[in-house]
Image (cartoon, grey):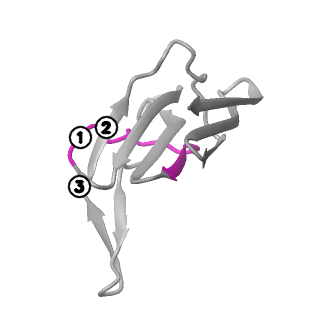
Amino acid sequence: MLPLLWKEENETPGWTQLKLPGQAPSPRCGHSVTSGGHYLLLFGGHGTGGWLSHYDIYYNDCIVLDRLSAQWKCLPIGNESPAAQAYHSLSHIGSCYLLFGGFDGKLTYGDYMVVGS
């Protein structure tokens, strides 16, 4: 898995790989990305400890791509943060983000969490 970000070119057909400043997300699958204003919010996901590793990593990090500054930013995780998980859904509704479900390698979640005001 590679931490790549691509942009579709409108003028000429094709894609361009973007290399943006800031702390980009680590390689993962099963994460969610949603758009809110000029931000893209990435949450959670599932990765591995490396090619020869036999353990899985589940994330509960929130990483924002600010589309105006074209920069990645890690958001601090509060005391009541969601569990590290993958395969969940995340939606932007009004001024809030709604997280539902997920899987942490052992448990399947069926709860909702609202973030924002």
Helix, strand or loop under label 1: loop
In magenta, the rendered stretch is 21-35
Q: Residue at x 59, y 39 (%)?
A: 97
Q: Which amino acid does label 2 sit on?
A: Lys
Report the residue marked by disc 3: 19
Please provide percent x and percent y for residue 116: 54, 32
Most distant residue in the right direction? 110
Report the residue marked by disc 2: 73
Helix, strand or loop under label 2: strand
Looking at the image, do the residues carrying marks 2 and 1 touch, with CB atoms under 8 Å apart?
yes
Report the residue marked by disc 1: 22
Residue 114, by quadrant, is top right
**Mark on residue 32?**
none
What whole-number distance in Å separates the C-alpha atoms at marks 2 and 1? 6 Å
Q: What residue type is labelled 1?
A: Gly
From this viewpoint, is residue 59 visible? yes
Looking at the image, do the residues carrying marks 3 and 1 touch, with CB atoms under 8 Å apart?
no
Q: Earlier in the sequence, mark 2 or mark 1?
A: 1
| Residue placed most toward the observer, 60 or 55 | 60
Q: Is residue 117 above or below residue 69?
A: above
Q: What predominant SS class does the magenta segment belong to?
A: loop
What whole-number distance in Å separates the C-alpha atoms at marks 3 and 1? 10 Å
In the image, residue 14 lies in the stretch drawn in magenta? no
Q: Which amino acid does label 3 sit on?
A: Lys
